[in-house]
Amino acid sequence: MARASAIAIVVFSCFLILVLQLADGSESKLCPPWCVTRLDASVARVNISFDWICENGADCRPIRPGGPCYVEGDIKAMSSYAFNDYFQKTRPSGGLCDYGEVATISNEDPSHGACNFTCTPY
Ligand SMILES: *[C@@H]1O[C@H](CO)[C@@H](O)[C@H](O)[C@H]1NC(C)=O
Ligand SMILES: *[C@@H]1O[C@H](CO)[C@@H](O)[C@H](O)[C@H]1NC(C)=O
């Protein structure tokens, strides 16, 4: 019994060290994840969340015509920029990447050309 709990403590300590190391690693690595628009989301629903998020804290200036992230006619590419910007800002306080089931987490950098997707340290 004593031996079993000693082993359990050792196993648990190793696990704890591993978790702490992983947490440490993610501290220096700010992104991923990014937050992007779901490919299977309907444009009508994306539009609703996209409008809302631009009025409630996302920086949507880069996706206006003439901006580095403006992609004519591609609502999903542009809304991805807005969702990610908002997600990066709200992530430290527990913000989720969902926005009415139209966005999802991605480990691939969605930046394109001169358009840099925001990455906020936390
Ligand atoms: C979504 O918004 C774009 C740009 O404002 C508009 O052109 C498009 O018709 C909208 N689509 C839907 C399904 O609401
Ligand atoms: C985008 O970010 C990368 C990496 O931080 C940087 O090298 C590049 O200059 C940035 N591009 C623009 C247009 O800001």
Image (cartoon, helix red, strand yellow):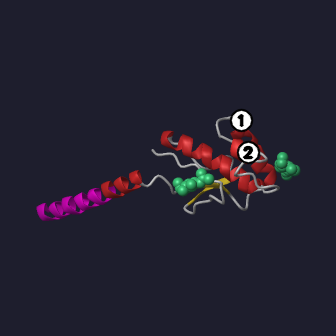
Query: Is ligand 1 within 8 Å of the beta carbon of the residue shown at mark 2?
Result: yes
Would you name the residue on which mark 1 appears? Answer: 55
First in sequence: mark 1 or mark 2? 2
- Judging depth in this view, the residue of 103 and 29 nearest the camera is 29
The part of the chain drawn in magenta is: 1-19
Would you name the residue on which mark 2 appears? Answer: 50
In the image as oriented, which residue stretches furthest toward the top? 56
In percent of width and height, residue 116 lies at 61, 53
Q: Residue at x 55, y 41 (%)?
A: 89
Looking at the figure, which quarter contains the C terminus?
top left
In the rendered structure, which amino acid carries the disc numbered 1? Glu
Q: Residues within 10 Å of mark 1 (few under 14, many from 20)?
A: few
In the rendered structure, which amino acid carries the disc numbered 2? Phe
Question: Quick check: 71 above or below 3?
Answer: above
SS of the residue under disc 1? helix
Q: Residue at x 36, y 58 (%)?
A: 22
